[in-house]
């Protein structure tokens, strides 16, 4: 299993792939090297999700997107194996490996499609609020800034301070942006035209799991009648139906360091993601098309058929 | 393809030139045109099916250019394209052109089936023609299918509010009356075009108790109203409505008084497009509709703004009454996937 950890590390760091696609690449490697396939794959998947490894320290992301990527790929593998002839195992293995590689390369295509659709929601002079760091959102904002005159408000996004990462990217592309503290969101919401977020996972009822604080921003946006758009590729769709915040898996809680200089406390245990229910979400931009939250369950059924 | 393009443009311009015949008339004529196109199109070899699809897509692109605000006309194009794709799928005809690549995960996971090379094109054309004829019939009879449901939604001693003129709503109310319901209708006059006046006359001729009210009285009278029933020009994919200007205020008033809003619209008006604000699918009418020719000094300082349409967000609508029954907003994605193909949502790709 150490080999699995090493492969994942390599995919994340050297190739710079996003977690879901890196997980698929790792599983593909496992297929390539395997002798007994399914058992090894299941073990590898459990390892990827549960053991602490480079992913946690990578960007403070939870293994949710790894879970969704693995689930989807494993479902596809099961289907191929059940339909294929057992005698030609080597052929099936080769086919699965090539499909795995092709699938893990679909990110730029999906990103392109999502950007094309999301661009339609922009207009000149708009103010967009973003929360958390999402490569999809960054791509969309950079593309939109080429065509329209937009301003981006970026939340600091504690405890991992991803807002600074987002600001770096926007600064490099010379997009006009402003960094705000997390608690200032309600204060500035009336001047915002739309809220745009990425997703760590999209759940069955159309809700979205994203960096902690997104639920609050969703509630504020709803109160001010501002649209909330979620941008995610369909590999993030996960077959989970959480009914409340407490229904999210154990690994969504983690310890973070407190603000330096505190005398008694050193670390706090906090959820790092929260669930934004579908009533607060206006539209989802995915590579499958523009979807309303009520359409997600249907798409999930199609993907897992 | 040039003579075809010319042919299409001529037809579309004739649609544009006609007097403001409503959505229904334009859709009916477009459907007939596409039916005649399918009858005459050359279908003898494998390449011809993708050709047919790209020709009809071209017609769709031209109609978005020449009639940009007639969303329902392009819907008909999409319905026909969906019919052709479904038929081709059933017969395992290869529809991919050289430029097509897999761009979505569902496309990736779908197995590539074996495509047949020998196809009975005469049979293929016949089935497509039959389906398009069904579509034509559906458009022609949509008002009847909708008004047949009237007695389940309107009951005696109710006060219904409607706004402006809509022939679908008119049929709907008349059908409820002939089913024996005794109700009263308030009609908002819908300035500046005052289409409510015609609606009032038509309702009165069917012996329905009608009251004509000004637009400003709508909020004041809303507390007495049991239901609001309105028609729409187009129904967008998220459940939003694209209607004549003025109905947004009516729906907001209804929300404030907790009055349900029912929208009657034929399925051909359901479009896979998403509007993001009031201006996405809007135009402005001539200032002449609200003001006489002003004095020359006044022109510098006065701005005349007459938007033609309103976008009503889906949260304000309670139920959509379509030819296939009453549907909720959360069900629309299902209707979309049944009647349109994903590849046709954006005709330019």
Image (tube, rainbow, N blue to C red):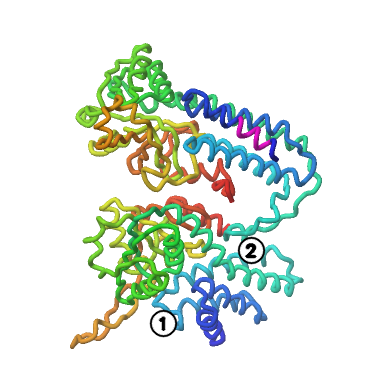
| In this rendering, position of residue A129 left or right of residue A144 | left
Is B292 located above or below residue B250 in the figure?
A: above
Residue ID at (67%, 64%)? A82
Q: Is residue A285 magenta?
A: no
The reply to whether callout 1 and callout 2 are in contact (CB within 8 Å) is: no
Question: Disc 2: which chain?
Answer: A
Residues at marks 1 and 2 on the same chain: yes
Between label 1 and label 2, give the one nearer the viewer.
Answer: 1
Which percent across, then down, holds residue B139?
A: 54, 28
Which percent across, then down, holds residue A73?
A: 58, 68
Choose top left, top right, bottom left or bottom right for residue A217.
bottom left
Answer yes or no: is residue B191 visible: no
Is A275 located above or below residue A298 in the figure?
A: below
Residue sitting at the far right: B118
Residue beneath disc 1:
A57
Marks 1 and 2 sit apart, C-alpha to C-alpha, by: 34 Å
Which percent across, then down, holds residue A236?
A: 48, 65
- Which structural element holds mark 2? helix
Residue sitting at the far front: B296
**Magenta segment:** B4-10
Answer yes or no: is residue A19 visible: yes
Residue beneath disc 2:
A79
| In this rendering, position of residue B148 left or right of residue B317 | right
Is A239 located above or below residue B161 in the figure?
A: below
Choose top left, top right, bottom left or bottom right for residue B319.
top left
Q: Quadrant of the N terminus of chain B?
A: top right
Question: Disc 1: which chain?
Answer: A
């Amino acid at each position: 299993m150490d080999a699995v950890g090493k492969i994942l590390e390599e995919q994340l760091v050297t190739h710079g792939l996003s977690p879901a696609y890196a997980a698929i690449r790792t599983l593909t490697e496992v297929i390539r090297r395997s002798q007994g396939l399914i058992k090894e794959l299941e073990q590898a998947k459990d390892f990827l999700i549960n053991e602490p490894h480079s992913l946690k320290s990578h960007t403070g992301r939870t293994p949710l997107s790894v879970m969704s990527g693995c689930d989807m790929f494993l479902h596809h593998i099961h289907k191929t194996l059940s339909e294929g002839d057992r005698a030609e195992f080597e052929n099936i293995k080769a086919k699965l490996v090539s499909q795995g590689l092709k699938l893990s390369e679909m990110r730029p295509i999906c990103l392109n499609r999502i950007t094309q659709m999301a661009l339609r929601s922009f207009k000149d002079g708009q103010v967009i609020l973003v929360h958390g760091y999402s490569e999809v959102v960054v791509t969309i904002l950079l593309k939109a800034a080429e065509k329209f005159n937009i301003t981006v408000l970026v939340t600091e996004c504690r405890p991992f301070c991803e807002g600074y990462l987002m600001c770096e990217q926007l600064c490099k592309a010379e997009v006009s942006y402003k960094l705000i503290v997390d608690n200032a969101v309600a204060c500035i919401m009336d001047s915002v035209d739309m809220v745009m977020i990425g997703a760590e996972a999209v759940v069955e009822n159309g809700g979205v799991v994203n960096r902690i604080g997104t639920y609050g921003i969703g509630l504020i946006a709803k109160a001010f009648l501002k649209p909330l758009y979620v941008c995610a590729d369909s590999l993030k769709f996960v077959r989970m139906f959480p009914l409340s915040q407490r229904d999210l898996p154990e690994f969504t809680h983690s310890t973070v360091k407190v603000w330096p200089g505190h005398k008694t406390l050193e670390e706090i245990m906090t959820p790092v993601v929260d669930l934004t229910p579908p009533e607060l979400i206006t539209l989802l931009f995915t590579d499958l098309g523009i979807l309303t939250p009520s359409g997600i369950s249907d798409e999930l059924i199609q993907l897992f058929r | 393809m040039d003579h075809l393009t010319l042919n299409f443009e001529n037809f579309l311009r004739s649609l544009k030139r006609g007097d403001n015949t409503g959505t229904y008339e334009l859709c009916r004529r477009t459907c007939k045109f596409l039916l005649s196109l399918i009858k005459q199109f050359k279908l003898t070899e494998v390449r011809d099916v993708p050709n047919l699809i790209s020709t009809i897509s071209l017609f769709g692109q031209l109609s978005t250019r020449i009639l940009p605000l007639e969303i329902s006309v392009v819907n008909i194009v999409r319905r026909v394209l969906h019919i052709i794709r479904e038929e081709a799928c059933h017969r395992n005809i290869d529809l991919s052109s050289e430029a097509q690549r897999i761009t979505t995960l569902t496309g990736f996971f779908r197995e590539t089936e074996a495509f047949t090379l020998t196809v009975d094109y005469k049979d293929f054309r016949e089935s497509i023609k039959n389906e398009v004829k069904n579509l034509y019939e559906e458009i022609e009879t949509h008002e009847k299918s909708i008004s047949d449901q009237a007695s389940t939604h309107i009951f005696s001693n109710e006060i219904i509010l409607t706004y402006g003129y809509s022939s679908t709503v008119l049929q709907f109310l008349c059908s409820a009356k002939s089913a024996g319901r005794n109700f009263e209708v308030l009609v908002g006059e819908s300035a500046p075009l005052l289409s409510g006046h015609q609606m009032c006359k038509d309702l009165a001729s069917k012996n329905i108790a009608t009251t004509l009210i000004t637009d400003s009285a709508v909020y004041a009278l809303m507390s007495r109203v049991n239901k609001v029933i309105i028609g729409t020009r187009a129904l967008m994919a998220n459940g939003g409505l694209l209607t004549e200007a003025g109905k947004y205020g009516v729906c907001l008033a209804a929300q404030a008084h907790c009055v349900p809003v029912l929208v009657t619209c034929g399925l051909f008006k359901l479009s896979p497009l998403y509007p993001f604000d009031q201006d996405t699918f809007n135009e402005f009418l001539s200032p002449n509709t609200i003001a006489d020719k002003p004095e020359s000094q006044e022109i510098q300082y006065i701005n005349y703004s007459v938007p033609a349409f309103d976008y009503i967000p889906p949260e304000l609508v309670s139920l959509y009454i379509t030819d296939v029954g009453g549907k909720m907003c959360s069900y629309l994605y299902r209707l979309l996937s049944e009647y349109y193909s994903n590849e046709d949502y954006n005709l330019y790709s």
